[in-house]
Amino acid sequence: MVISHRSAQILHIGKDCFPMKIAICDDNHAFASLLYEKIISYFAKIDKQCICEKFFSPEKLLAADLSATHVVFLDVDMPKINGIDTAHKLRMEHPEIYIVFVTAWIEYAPAGYHVSAFRYLLKQRLDSELARCLDDIREKIAQSQERIQLQGREYPFEIALNDILYFEGSSYRMVRLHTRDGQVVEFRGKLSDLEKNLCDKGFLRIQNSFIVNMHHLLQIKNYKAYLKDGTTLKTSERNYSKICEHYLIWKGQQL
């Protein structure tokens, strides 16, 4: 469908259009089996698909093909290679995986920040915390699967919101889209329309010429926006305080 030159259509791909693939790694066979049963029960109750696999050592987990895995539930206290070191190795190979540490000791929690752990679950609170954790992960995956349809110079095209770094305004009602893999795509449209469509999707207009994806924003400092890929963009000096406030509020909501 060819859309208006002045509009952009958000295409939602549901969070449950594919089976969620989950890995459990815990050297305690009894607990790994218990967690497995609770995860399977959670998905059965909401009538959704899930593929769940158990690993009883970090070595076997790291040797497995995890390319299609969405979530790893990882015990912290394991022999030879502990959960924190295992998570470091996972991050290097699979940066998109959601890591959930499962432990009996809350004092391990600060170490999880170094590997961007999604959540810490206490084993003794599994019944009260697991469902909320899985709900939140499913919602994050849903957001990462959302796509936008745009009108290119010759034909419409689609791109995942998560693959967009920022939009840059250009002349003659054309916009340049900068992607995570370094591509620049030009399409018909206006930044004002994109701002309206994407304001609740984690995008922030930092000045007249730029709308950035805050998921890829490292920090805003000294009237500049620093993106995680090394790109630096100037922000509006006039609206700088509001821009910083908006970003900090959004960032706090992601915790």
Image (cartoon, helix red, strand yellow):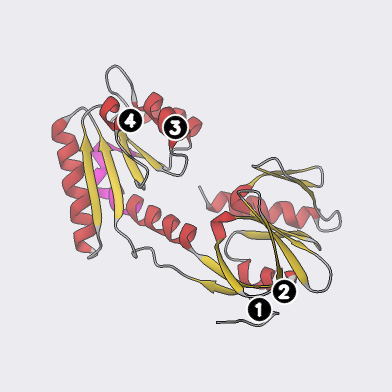
User: Dot 1: what SS?
Assistant: loop
Q: Residues within 10 Å of mark 4 (few under 14, many from 20)?
A: some
Cα separation, mark 2 vs mark 3, equals: 42 Å
Indicate the amino acid at tag 1: Ser
Looking at the image, the residue that sits furthest to the front is: 154
The mark lying in front, picked from 4 and 3, is 4
Indicate the amino acid at tag 2: Gly
Q: Earlier in the sequence, mark 4 or mark 2?
A: 4
User: Dot 4: what SS?
Assistant: helix
Residue 26 spot, x, y in % from top left: 24, 31
Q: Earlier in the sequence, mark 4 or mark 3?
A: 4
The residue at the point 74 percent across, 56 percent down is 243
Q: Is residue 183 left or right of residue 94?
A: right
Q: Which mark is residue 62?
A: 4
The residue at the point 57 percent across, 63 percent down is 201
Residue 113 is inside the magenta segment: no
Asked if labels 1 and 2 touch by Cβ distance under 8 angstroms, the answer is yes
Cα separation, mark 3 vs mark 1, equals: 42 Å
Cα separation, mark 4 vs mark 1, equals: 45 Å
For label 1, the residue is 7
Q: Earlier in the sequence, mark 2 or mark 1?
A: 1
In this rendering, is residue 62 above or below 196?
A: above
Q: Which mark is residue 112?
A: 3
The mark lying in front, picked from 3 and 1, is 1
In this rendering, is residue 147 above or below 184?
A: below
Q: Which residues are magenta?
A: 121-132
Looking at the image, the residue that sits furthest to the left is: 30
The residue at the point 74 percent across, 73 percent down is 190
Q: Which mark is residue 189?
A: 2
User: Dot 2: what SS?
Assistant: loop
Q: Nearer the viewer, residue 69 or 143?
A: 69
